Image (cartoon, rainbow, N blue to C red):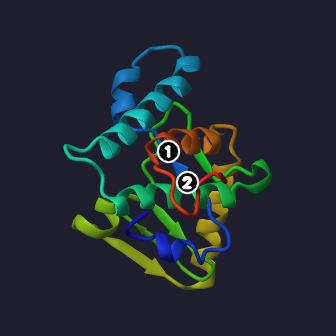
């Protein structure tokens, strides 16, 4: 959130489709499909713990970044609308696409601080209407596919324990 938070606050529509983690693919092996959603949730938990449980206490800014992310997701999920989905199908989804109203970006960058600001990544951007429309249609097919499982409430619930109340999200006294 610290990398793109202010810019994302200006976004009118936001959806995030997360692919299966390669680690999950290696671990899943021949296990039954019904356990995979639970295992994916465990990997999301592990990733959040890894990010949240640093060798030092988080700074106020870091805690506020997590709070702002949770608030952002809640605003966009108004009325129970899915905002974050996890791809829960047997094949590995490794796509990285950024879609705005007027442009698309496709490349190697994950939607993480490392992928967006620190790593050496490549993202090619296109503004031509046919390319934007084609990728938008691809995304909508993936988003509406039954393998894309709503994970919005679970992600928000997993973020909240790592948040200290701030003036923006503090409960009234």
Please state the horizontal and vertical placement of residue 41, each as a whole percent of the image. 50, 31
Instruction: Determine if residue 109 is in view.
Output: no
Residue 14, image x, y percentages: 62, 64
> Looking at the image, which is closer to me, 5 or 95?
5
Q: Identify the residue shown where x is 44% and y is 71%.
A: 4
What residue do we see at 44% from left, 28% from top? 42
The residue labelled by disc 2 is 70
The residue tagged 1 is: 159
Q: Nearer the viewer, residue 41 or 78?
A: 78
Q: Vertical placement of 147 versus 105: above or below?
A: above
* Above or below 22: residue 115: below
Is 138 placed left or right of 125 in the picture?
right
Kind of element beneath mark 2: helix
**Which element is circle 1 on?**
helix
Considering every residue shown, the one lying at the far right of the view is 79
| Label 1 or label 2, whichever comes before in sequence order | 2
CB-based contact (under 8 Å), mark 1 and mark 2:
yes
Q: How far, Cα to Cα, is label 1 from label 2?
A: 6 Å
């Amino acid at each position: 959130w610290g990398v793109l938070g202010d810019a994302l606050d200006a976004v009118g529509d936001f959806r995030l489709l997360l692919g299966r983690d390669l680690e999950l693919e290696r671990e899943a092996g021949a296990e039954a499909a019904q356990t995979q959603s639970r295992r994916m949730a465990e990997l999301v938990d592990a990733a959040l713990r890894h990010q949240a449980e640093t060798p030092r206490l988080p700074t106020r800014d870091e805690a506020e970044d997590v709070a702002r992310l949770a608030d952002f997701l809640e605003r966009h999920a108004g009325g129970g609308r899915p905002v974050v989905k996890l791809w829960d199908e047997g094949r590995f989804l490794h796509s990285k696409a950024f879609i705005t109203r007027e442009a698309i970006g496709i490349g190697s960058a994950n939607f993480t601080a490392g992928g967006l600001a620190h790593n050496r990544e490549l993202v090619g951007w296109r503004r031509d209407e046919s390319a934007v429309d084609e990728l938008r249609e691809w995304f909508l097919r993936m988003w509406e596919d039954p393998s894309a499982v709503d994970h919005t409430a679970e992600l928000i619930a997993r973020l909240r324990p790592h948040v200290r109340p701030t003036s923006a999200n503090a409960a009234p006294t």
